[in-house]
């Protein structure tokens, strides 16, 4: 057997290598802008139901305007409150967290063997840059970026359905086109339900943990509530893990009764999430385990910070929902409308 390598094959291989290198360099140079586009697509998909509800009672352009202005104002108010409170709370934690860790090490050998004080100091040093006044200044300086992202989000909300429809029409086989359109519609619906339900859960957990910490006079209750709510997005174990900072502060600075009360609050919230909330979310949308969201969030945070963790996890939810829709469609099982004829895409 002889293997002949033609000059055309070598040229094709070299061209592919050059093209791959150019694409890699282009992605590295424009990775931030690509991230902005992905984030805008996700936000537009989440806001689409609100636009559709308002569209029934007013012109679509007015529904788009109200939705964009309302979401922008709400985001600005919440972000400003979070930044200010996080900065103040972090200043408090810089003083109180090492003191609580030292108190626990003096009372328990396990904390001393775990080197709790050293680990607490390391965590505070890691989060110092993201919660200082410089971060606020950078956020204010990025107002132009937010304006561009807002315009891009509005573009996807207006022309997104038309773009999707044009993509589906490129498939000539009618049955295949209907199947792919049904899968995409199911994935979009289920991932949107999951994300919105998770956001609602994060708000409830943050309020509950923050209020309990405030009642028990634990320092920086706002920061502790935000941590519990964000980490609590990880299914099954997130609330307990996110509530550990509040629990350690209550145990180190207060009485053991305070730690027990806060532990009961965390266990009750986690039990409700596992036995009630998680089952309803999985039944109405898609099942997402704890491992993949945690891994993707950590990788996204290392690469792009909070935004990378947030939108990376959201993209993962859509991917899982799409794989779930493909599997259901392949098995021929109709669950929660998966297999129904997809609704026509709205036109602006």
Image (spheres, rainbow, N blue to C red):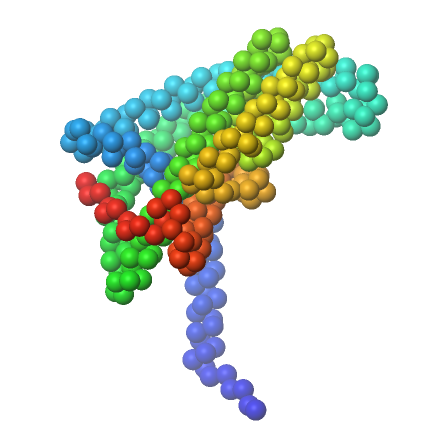
Left or right, 189 with reference to 112: left
Location of residue 207 in the rendering, given as x and y in whole percent from the top left corner? 50, 18
The answer to whether one can see residue 285 in this image is yes
* Residue at the image position 34 percent from the left and 39 percent from the top: 45
Location of residue 197 in the rendering, given as x and y in whole percent from the top left corner? 43, 32
**Quadrant hosting residue 266:** top right
* Residue at the image position 28 percent from the left and 51 percent from the top: 341
Q: Is residue 187 above or below residue 98?
A: below
**Quadrant hosting residue 298:** top right
Q: Nearer the viewer, residue 139 or 49?
A: 49
Quadrant housing the N terminus: bottom right
* Residue at the image position 48 percent from the left and 16 percent from the top: 84
Location of residue 227 in the rendering, given as x and y in whole percent from the top left corner? 56, 25
**Residue that sits furthest to the bottom in the current view:** 1
**Residue that sits furthest to the right in the current view:** 109
Location of residue 262 in the rendering, given as x and y in whole percent from the top left corner? 63, 17
The answer to whether one can see residue 304 in this image is no
Left or right, 39 with reference to 300: left
Left or right, 145 with reference to 63: right
Q: Is residue 183 above or below residue 159?
A: below
* Residue at the image position 47 percent from the left and 48 percent from the top: 320
Q: Nearer the viewer, residue 156 or 60?
A: 60
Q: Nearer the viewer, residue 254 or 142?
A: 254
Quadrant housing the C terminus: top left
**Quadrant hosting residue 107:** top right
């Amino acid at each position: 057997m002889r293997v002949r390598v033609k000059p055309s094959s070598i040229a094709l291989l070299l061209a592919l290598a050059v093209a791959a290198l150019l694409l890699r360099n282009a992605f590295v140079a424009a990775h931030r802008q690509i991230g902005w586009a992905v984030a805008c697509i996700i936000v537009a998909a989440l806001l689409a139901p609100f636009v559709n509800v308002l569209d029934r009672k007013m012109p679509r352009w007015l529904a788009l305007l109200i939705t964009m202005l309302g979401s922008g104002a709400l985001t600005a108010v919440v972000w400003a409150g979070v930044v200010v409170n996080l900065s103040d709370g972090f200043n408090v934690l810089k003083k109180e967290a090492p003191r609580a860790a030292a108190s626990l090490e003096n009372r328990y050998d396990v904390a001393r063997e775990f080197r709790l004080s050293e680990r607490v100091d390391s965590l505070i040093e890691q989060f110092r840059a993201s919660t200082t006044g410089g971060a606020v200044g950078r956020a204010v300086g990025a107002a132009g970026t937010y304006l561009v992202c807002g315009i891009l989000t509005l573009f996807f909300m207006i022309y997104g359905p038309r773009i999707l429809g044009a993509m589906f029409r490129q498939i000539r086989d009618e049955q295949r086109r209907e199947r792919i359109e049904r899968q995409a519609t199911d994935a979009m619906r289920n991932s949107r339900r999951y994300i919105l339900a998770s956001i609602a859960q994060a708000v409830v957990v943050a309020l509950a943990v923050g209020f309990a910490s405030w009642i028990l006079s634990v320092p920086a209750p706002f920061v502790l509530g935000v941590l519990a709510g964000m980490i609590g997005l990880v299914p099954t174990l997130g609330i307990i893990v996110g509530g550990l900072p509040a629990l350690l502060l209550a145990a180190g600075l207060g009485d053991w009764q305070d730690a027990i009360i806060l532990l009961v609050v965390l266990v009750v919230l986690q039990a409700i999430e596992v036995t009630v909330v998680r089952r309803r979310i999985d039944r109405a949308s898609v099942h997402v385990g704890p491992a993949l969201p945690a891994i993707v969030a950590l990788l996204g945070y290392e690469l792009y910070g909070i935004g990378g963790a947030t939108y990376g996890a959201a993209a993962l939810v859509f991917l899982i929902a799409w794989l779930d829709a493909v599997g259901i469609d392949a098995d021929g099982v109709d669950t929660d409308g998966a297999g129904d004829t997809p609704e026509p895409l709205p036109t602006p």
